[in-house]
Amino acid sequence: MTSRDNCIEQFRGKIPKEMFDDIVDSDNVAEHISAGIETLQLEKRQKALQIIAIRNSSNQMDSHSRGLDWGLMSVLGRDIFGEGVGDSVESRSAAILGDVHADVSDVLHAYNSGPLGLSKT
């Protein structure tokens, strides 16, 4: 067995089959393996962050003084009683939309766009 075959056999069963097939078909095995490892590490990190976010939202729902149903309402939308703790999905989406508008405003200003399209100024 060559060192390439040994390297490939080490990772058989440890990575997804699609990724393994790409590695076997490529000429630069080491580069594909390192890229695959980085991808798997990123996916693992994202899953961990999602679990943390779900746990925080669950704790926020449980801690609402008017019960779990109002806690769910405060997580998804506005808390009409003002008793919710933390951020809601609605406020997060508004903040992200505000960031996008701030990033795009320079571009729109450079193109002199108006409500009905481009203007000649």
Image (cartoon, rainbow, N blue to C red):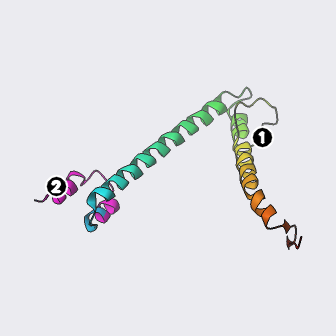
Residue 28, above or below 13? below
At 43% from the left edge and 45% from the top edge, which residue is drawn? 44
Towards the viewer: 72 or 112: 112
Residue 100, above or below 48? below
Q: Characterize the magenta stretch by its predominant secondary structure.
A: helix
Q: Position of residue 73 (x, y in %)?
A: 72, 40
Question: Callout 1: few (<14), some (14-19), or many (20+) C-alpha neighbours within 10 Å?
Answer: some
Residue 110 is drawn in which quadrant? bottom right
Residue 60 is drawn in which quadrant? top right
Residue 33, above or below 45? below
Q: Position of residue 49 (x, y in %)?
A: 52, 40
What are the residue bounds of the magenta stretch? 2-22
Query: In the rendered image, which residue does mark 2 sit on?
Result: 6
Q: Secondary structure at mark 2?
A: helix
Towards the viewer: 36 or 16: 36
At 29% from the left edge and 64% from the top edge, which residue is drawn? 21
Query: In the rendered image, which residue does mark 1 sit on?
Result: 78
Q: Amino acid at mark 1?
A: Arg
Q: Position of residue 7 (x, y in %)?
A: 20, 54
Q: Secondary structure at mark 1?
A: loop
